[in-house]
């Protein structure tokens, strides 16, 4: 009887919490939808109202003046400066039609209060940063769309949400304004005689490979800006990471688990972090890092500037952004939903299991005839990666692999050899599927189809990066595992205007309801929602 009552109480409590959370998320969606609907109407009204031009101009001047005052707000009553951007004459000369044309061309949408004061930067010179910082961009011709839109917003001290496909240049989008922020903090702290307790810039990444990629960019900048950075991640000894932190690194790039360990051990104080970046936020939440991320954010400076970047915009990321970002502007390149890059040609081949290895050898003869161009081959399991690597080597191909059974040192070495084209064929599990920025990967071959359609999109996103085109060739088996993803794959192909093989019509193309990635069908029923907080139950004596 008591147990029955207790069960009912717990169930009622959980239902109440779930209902409250759903109402909150629905409210966020409604607010965002309202903003989206208002934006075009406002622009249309401005175009339609031609009478009283003088009054309108006076009103606009006042509005512009107040917006300029708003730009200074991030620096008021703060121990550090946030705003470093003044609009360049070239940028200011862009007409409304120029801005509209640029954003339509690149499928860019901006949401949030204050968005209208910003215009995209079409050249690096328009950012107006010192030459030593801009030197990092020398190898590029022009900013990518995400950089064009994010730089003026971040450099003005505002929080930002950036939604863009993989390979869009997000790393430099948040790094450039961060370098100006760090440079000014170092100068200001020195003038005030203030001694920092920890880093100024903190970048949180879901995987060590992505963290190491951000670290490479920061190391390139370290000579120009004279900063020290440290990359902390699991799987290696803590000693060298602790040593770098003790030396007073201005920048920490970290995975959530190792950072929490170092915080608990007293080696990493985040109270001076005034510029926070959450990179690939959707994947971090998907992997169950929500509690760690909340703990990390709570330890940073309360008046910090925050940049959240993500490939998609699920409810879990929406709720996190609403809670921890202050009046952000949201920049979406393309769609909020998961979508494959439009520069990638997707080839799907329905094939039997036993035919895959001979077919892979045929494809390499076609795609890799020069024996020099880089090709990334994805498999599902660690043992499969080793088997395919050995098989390719036995056939005379110059191949290496990265997977979970290899040490971090071996994985890093394999990546570096692939990046330098010393070994142009890399066999990888999904550990390398997201975030890695390896230039000029001409082809991605999916030897095994991944467990989720999200992983498929992120896999093929390793090619067609930085404005270049690429080809993704996928083996889709007739077995039950791949069959379950048929409907989702066909949708991704159609959304990207790609050819759908006739053989796909033999599968059930209904898109099944997703199971939770961590718990399958037995876990939380709302896929992608934040995990419920534990509820303490007190028993009477």
Image (cartoon, grey):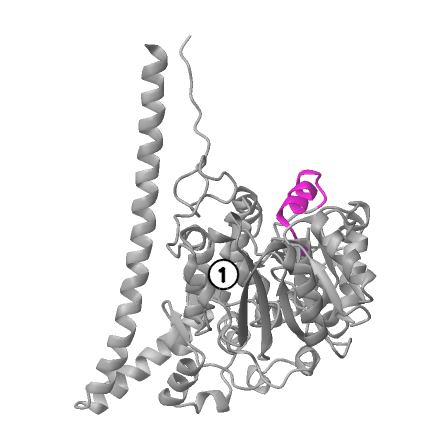
Q: Which residue lies at the image location 44% right of the left edge and 55% below the top edge?
A: 321
Image quadrant assignment for residue 37: bottom left
Q: Residues within 10 Å of mark 1 (few under 14, many from 20)?
A: few
State left or right for residue 318 relative to residue 372.
Answer: left
Image quadrant containing the C terminus: top left
Up the image or down, 298 lies above or below 391; here it is above
| Along the line of sight, the residue nearer the viewer: 106 or 197 | 106
Relative to 206, 222 lies left or right: right
Q: Residue 6, located in which quarter of the rendered image?
A: top left
> Which span of residues is magenta-colored?
252-267
The residue at 32%/61% (across/down) is 32
Relative image position of residue 517 (x, y in whole percent): 50, 45
Tell me residue 105's x, y (percent).
Answer: 43, 83
Q: Residue at x 55, y 78 (%)?
A: 144
Could you tell me if residue 464 is visible in this image?
no
What's the residue at 33%, 54% (across, down)? 28
Q: Quadrant of the N terminus?
A: top left
- Is 134 part of what is drawn in magenta? no
- Residue 434: where, in percent of width, then height? 60, 60
Q: x, y percentage for residue 156?
A: 50, 72
- Looking at the image, residue 442 sits to the left or right of residue 286; the answer is right
> Of helix, strand and loop, which one carries label 1?
loop
Residue receiving disc 1: 77
Instruction: Tell me if residue 433 can be seen.
Output: yes
- Total labels drawn: 1
């Amino acid at each position: 009887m008591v147990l029955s009552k207790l069960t009912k109480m717990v169930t009622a409590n959980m239902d109440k919490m779930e209902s409250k959370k759903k109402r909150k998320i629905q409210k966020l969606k409604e607010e965002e939808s309202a903003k989206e609907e208002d934006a075009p109407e406002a622009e249309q009204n401005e175009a339609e109202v031609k009478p009283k031009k003088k009054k309108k101009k006076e009103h606009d001047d006042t509005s512009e003046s107040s917006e300029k005052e708003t730009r200074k707000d991030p620096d008021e009553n703060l121990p550090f400066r946030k705003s470093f951007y003044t609009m360049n004459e070239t940028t200011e000369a862009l007409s409304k039609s120029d801005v509209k044309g640029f954003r339509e061309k690149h499928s860019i949408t901006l949401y949030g209060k204050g968005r209208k004061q910003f215009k995209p930067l079409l050249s690096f010179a328009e950012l107006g940063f010192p030459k030593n910082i801009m030197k990092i961009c020398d190898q590029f011709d022009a900013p990518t769309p995400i950089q064009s839109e994010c730089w003026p917003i971040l450099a003005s001290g505002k929080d930002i949400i950036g939604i863009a496909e993989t390979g869009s240049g997000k790393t430099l989008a948040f790094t450039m304004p961060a370098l100006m922020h760090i440079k000014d903090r170092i100068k200001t702290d020195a003038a005030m005689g203030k001694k920092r307790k920890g880093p100024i810039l903190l970048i949180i990444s879901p995987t060590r490979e992505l963290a190491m990629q951000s670290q490479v960019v920061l190391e390139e900048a370290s000579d120009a800006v004279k900063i020290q950075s440290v990359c902390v991640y699991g799987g290696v000894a803590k000693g060298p990471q602790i040593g770098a932190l003790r030396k007073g690194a201005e920048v920490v790039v970290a995975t959530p688990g190792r950072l929490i360990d170092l915080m608990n051990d007293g080696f990493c104080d985040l109270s001076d972090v005034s510029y926070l970046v959450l990179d690939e936020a959707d994947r971090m939440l998907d992997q169950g890092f929500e509690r760690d991320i909340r703990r990390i954010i709570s330890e940073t400076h309360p008046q910090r500037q925050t940049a959240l970047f993500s490939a998609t915009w699920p409810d879990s990321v929406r709720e996190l952004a609403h809670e921890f970002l202050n009046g952000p502007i949201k920049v979406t390149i393309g769609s909020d939903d998961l979508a494959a890059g439009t520069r990638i040609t997707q080839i799907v081949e329905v094939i039997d299991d036993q035919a895959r290895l001979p077919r892979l050898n045929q494809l390499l003869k076609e795609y890799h005839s020069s024996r020099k161009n880089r090709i990334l081959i994805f498999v599902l399991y660690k043992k499969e990666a080793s088997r395919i690597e050995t098989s390719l080597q036995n056939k005379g191909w110059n191949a290496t692999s990265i997977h979970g059974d290899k040490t971090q040192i071996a994985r890093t070495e394999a990546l570096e050899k692939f990046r330098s084209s010393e070994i142009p064929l890399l066999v990888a599990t999904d550990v390398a599927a997201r975030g890695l920025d390896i230039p000029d990967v001409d082809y991605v071959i999916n030897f095994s189809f991944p467990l989720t359609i999200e992983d498929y999109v992120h896999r093929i996103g390793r090619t067609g990066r930085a404005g270049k085109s690429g080809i993704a060739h996928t083996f889709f088996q007739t077995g039950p595992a791949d069959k379950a993803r048929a409907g989702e794959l066909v949708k991704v192909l159609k959304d990207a205007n790609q050819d759908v093989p006739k053989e796909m019509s033999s599968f059930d193309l209904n898109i099944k309801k997703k199971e939770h990635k961590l718990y399958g069908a037995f876990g939380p029923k709302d896929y992608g929602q934040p995990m419920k907080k534990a509820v303490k139950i007190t028993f009477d004596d």
